[in-house]
Amino acid sequence: MNHRFHTPLAVYRVGQKRDEDDLFDDRKSGKAADLKCFVVKTQTEAKADAKPVMYIVKKTIGVPKQADVKLSDEVVLFGRRYLVVDANPHRYWKELLVTCEVKGNDRA
């Protein structure tokens, strides 16, 4: 495995429980895997129209190719929860695009 895979990453599979009206009641998450990853790129954009200012943090992270990560899973990286919005397979590894929103004073 590539030596760059050293950052811990927790993957949570999010399922939805239906209520009696056949509507989604809540999002239940269960841990699917603990992986090692590396951060390829980080991009931060400001949502200036929101008060207080919110930032959208987008990260591109690399995980092992055989990792069981699907779209709409949640991953915890550096103590912050991100949503997986895209997955791009490469030859030996898989590239995930994850995103989350943070408050202006919590930006990192």
Image (cartoon, rainbow, N blue to C red):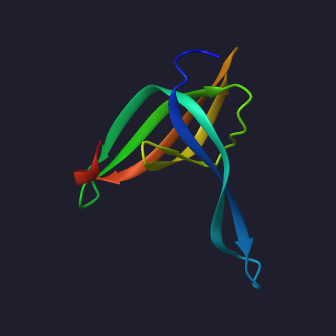
Residue 64 sits above or below residue 30 on the image: above
| Residue sticking out furthest to the bottom | 20
Which residue is at 27% across, 51% downward? 106
Q: Is residue 40 above or below residue 17?
A: above
Q: In the rendered picture of this protein, how many numbered marks are placed on residues?
A: 0
Q: Position of residue 92 (x, y in %)?
A: 69, 16
Quadrant location of the C terminus? top left
The quarter holding residue 95 reads top right
Q: Position of residue 15 (x, y in %)?
A: 71, 61
Determine whether, in the image, residue 37 is placed left or right of residue 20: left
Q: Position of residue 22 (x, y in %)?
A: 77, 78
Residue 18: x %, y % from top left: 74, 75
Which residue is painted at 54% across and 39% down in the image? 9
Q: Residue at x 71, y 76 (%)?
A: 23
Q: Is residue 65 left or right of residue 56?
A: right
- In this rendered view, identify the residue nearer to me: 35 or 50: 35
Q: Give the quarter of the figure containing the N terminus.
A: top right
